[in-house]
Image (tube, coloured by chain):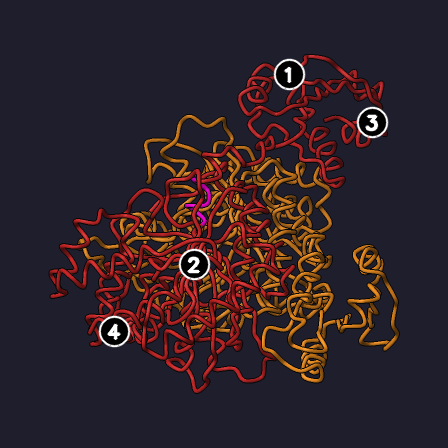
Chain colours: A orange, B red
């Protein structure tokens, strides 16, 4: 796993701030679930298969524990056991997660996600709100050109049911294969579907079905031409209709596509699902999510219909880097206070302390270096302003502030120094 | 391990911000070392004994890994392998750490620390700077009444050497016992020292020695009356003299005490050491640290004299709560946009979107509730302002903004709404 070095850390802190701004505007509260969960909690919905994909171990008390692999599980566990909170409960988190994956481009064993969840609303308005937050986060970090692909898991499930794929394991396998549609070529997916004993004709039908997409209302009209007898399909269509109107109200219609190939890989989704893509980017979905009405019941006594969205910080960073959207990094400090002789160090510290008290980042020499070496450091650390303290400056109480890139100097008294430096760019 | 719920999360985010403000003023760069290290890295200085105190496990590739137990080890590992950075390297981090401790008051198995480290300066000016940052962090979160106790490990080591305690294991054991002086009573510590075969007379001498304390310069004068032949003691005294002048320059003298009982428990310290205490608090040290000139060599080819300070966020939070220093929590949103009838929801969403675009936190109903239920929610969620949208409001384009605590209403046109709400407290 990798360390986060200064430039990346500054970018991350900037991103986290921009994300928190957005979630707060929607009335979400920030929380953070525990990093270590019992293995039982982590397995609750995904089954023991998840063990192959996570970091888990026995602690000294022989309990099986694991590092969280997403934030949704923890947030759901928290609210499932609380009945004192006014609903809907709107929780957001930004935090690190661990997966024992093979690392790939934009995907790491330790990764950070932002996550928003709404617990306690069955309405597609809630789905629209989390989609809107996702879109707003992208806009708030400068990404304008993205597309959100939306479907309803109930729809594809109803269609697969109608094709005779009803057994839950086979259904799950089919969905996992369809989920790879934007990553693998069709021939490969056909092979995988055939391997789980789906006939050639049905495979062809499935591909026709999931190729249906278009602007929300256009897609809904096309959908009406396909007959699916299952009651679930009717519910799914109604949900997508309500959602389409809500997306309109959120001003999102032009950024959204209904696309029946969107199914989401993770097992707990059971309604509206979505994935967003940076049109210029190449890192896959930059956020995704959907409805998981059955998950809360698994962790607590409560039956809380829920929906949420999450996005990977590392992928978002790749998109922002490619589009050159990160702000210019600030210098590590604005001023270096150098001394002509080492016996004046304490005067430098006093001056730097005064600057720091006035919120100006200042550095003094900590290595007993001579003036030449101090200036070498100022250059290599790219500190924009330099003040040199000597006997003369201490006697006259007059200082020179040197701009290291233009090589020009500004004169200042000790008393005016703070306001002089604040006025410099 | 515990989840961080909204009130605590807000307090933490506030604290992290205040801490980052301070470290940046001193020209520190924020970084974050990886959460999982090889067991070899974690054991490098402390030896295999550390296994009993940390979370470690074998991964699927049979590598022994462990969760970081502090930030110093990771930061040191990072810089030990870099020779391209201008020195001194000043790195800071705020991050979670894991220890397999028995949880106690103010001490948890998962805890967060702030941490500042200066690599590449042997001068006590660097020690003074990290002490100053610690003090400034406390002041910047509102704690004024604290005391920083400072010593030099070389001094107590030289004294113990002179008493004939020279073997490194016995020396380490003695220091660990002395380290408990503020937690255990003297009789208990005497018993423990006797158990590692230190004579009664020597135990008495040790207690006399470590009871020496006072304002920096007073303590240094007293120290001159004790004869320690070891060369290390002379170096230690000189370091403490330079430090005393630097603390003066930083304006810290009145907050500092030299106290020979300060030794720090962790094995890697080898020079100036310090611990800070909230005078009103009862949680032990709220920050501590010191010099560890030999640690970098353990991780890399470089010999970098280093010093640093770290503080526990959980303990700091207890101190701040006891002193009532946290800011008043903000409401989860400023406005709730309610609708008289559910078919007006989209108008509510549009209005809320407009408010959010202007950085006003707004909530709309996501549960198809009637007006009465929406108002119940506004009350229980303590949202300060309410707007009710009905046919009349949509036709007249006039709204009422209701203050939920005073029960007064302000009228506004749709166009003026943003500025009206911004002007309300």
Image quarter for residue B347?
A: top right
Q: Label 1: chain?
A: B
Q: Label 3: chain?
A: B
- Name the outermost residue toward the bottom: B301
The location of residue A190, given as percent across then percent down, is 45, 69
Q: Nearer the viewer, residue B279 or A133?
A: B279
Looking at the figure, which quarter contains the C terminus of chain B? top right
The location of residue A263, given as percent across then percent down, is 49, 54
Look at mark 4 in the image and give the residue it sits on.
B162
Asked if marks 4 and 2 touch (Cβ < 8 Å), the reply is no
Q: Earlier in the sequence, mark 1 or mark 3?
A: 1
The answer to whether residue B148 is above or below residue B239 is: above
Residue stretch in magenta: B313-318
Q: CA distance from mark 2 to mark 1?
A: 58 Å
- Local secondary structure at mark 3: loop
Q: Label 2: chain?
A: B
Query: Do dots 4 and 1 share one subunit?
Result: yes
Residue B219, numbered label: 2
- Local secondary structure at mark 4: helix
Q: Nearer the viewer, residue A321 or A274?
A: A321
């Amino acid at each position: 796993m990798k360390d986060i070095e200064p430039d990346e850390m500054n970018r991350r802190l900037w991103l986290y701030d921009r994300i928190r701004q957005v979630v707060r505007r929607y009335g979400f509260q920030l929380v953070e679930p525990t990093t270590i969960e019992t293995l039982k909690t982590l397995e609750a919905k995904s089954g023991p298969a998840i063990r192959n994909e996570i970091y888990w171990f026995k602690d000294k008390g022989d309990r099986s524990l694991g590092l969280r692999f997403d934030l949704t599980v923890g947030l759901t566990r928290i609210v499932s056991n609380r009945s004192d909170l006014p609903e809907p409960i709107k929780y957001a988190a930004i935090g690190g997660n661990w997966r024992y994956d093979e690392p790939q481009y934009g995907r790491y064993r330790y990764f950070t996600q932002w996550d928003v969840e709404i617990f306690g609303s069955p309405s597609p308005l809630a789905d629209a709100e989390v989609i809107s937050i996702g879109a707003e986060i992208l806009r708030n970090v400068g990404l304008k050109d993205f597309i959100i692909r939306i479907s309803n898991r109930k729809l594809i499930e109803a269609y697969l049911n109608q094709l005779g794929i009803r057994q839950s394991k086979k259904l799950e396998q089919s969905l996992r294969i369809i989920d790879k549609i934007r990553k693998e070529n069709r021939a490969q997916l056909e092979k995988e579907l055939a391997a789980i004993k789906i006939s050639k004709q049905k495979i062809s039908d499935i591909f026709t079905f999931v190729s249906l997409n278009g602007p929300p209302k256009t897609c809904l009209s096309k959908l009406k031409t396909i007959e699916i007898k299952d009651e679930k399909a009717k519910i799914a269509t109604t949900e997508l209709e309500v959602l389409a109107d809500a997306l309109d109200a959120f001003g999102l219609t032009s950024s959204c596509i209904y696309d029946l190939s969107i199914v989401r890989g993770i097992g707990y989704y059971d309604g509206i699902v979505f994935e967003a893509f940076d049109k210029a980017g190449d890192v896959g979905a930059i956020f995704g999510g959907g409805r998981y009405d059955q998950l809360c019941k698994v962790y607590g006594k409560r039956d809380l219909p829920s929906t949420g969205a999450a996005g990977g910080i590392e992928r978002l960073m790749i998109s922002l880097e490619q589009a050159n959207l990160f702000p210019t990094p600030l210098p590590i400090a604005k001023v270096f206070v150098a001394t002509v002789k080492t016996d004046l160090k304490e005067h430098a510290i006093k001056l730097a302390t005064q600057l720091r008290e006035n919120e100006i980042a200042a550095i003094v020499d900590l290595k007993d270096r001579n003036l030449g070496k101090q200036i070498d450091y100022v250059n290599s650390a790219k500190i924009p302003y330099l003040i040199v303290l000597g006997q003369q400056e201490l006697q006259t109480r007059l200082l020179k502030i040197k701009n290291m890139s233009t090589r020009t100097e500004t004169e200042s008294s000790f008393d005016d120094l703070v306001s002089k430096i604040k006025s410099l760019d």
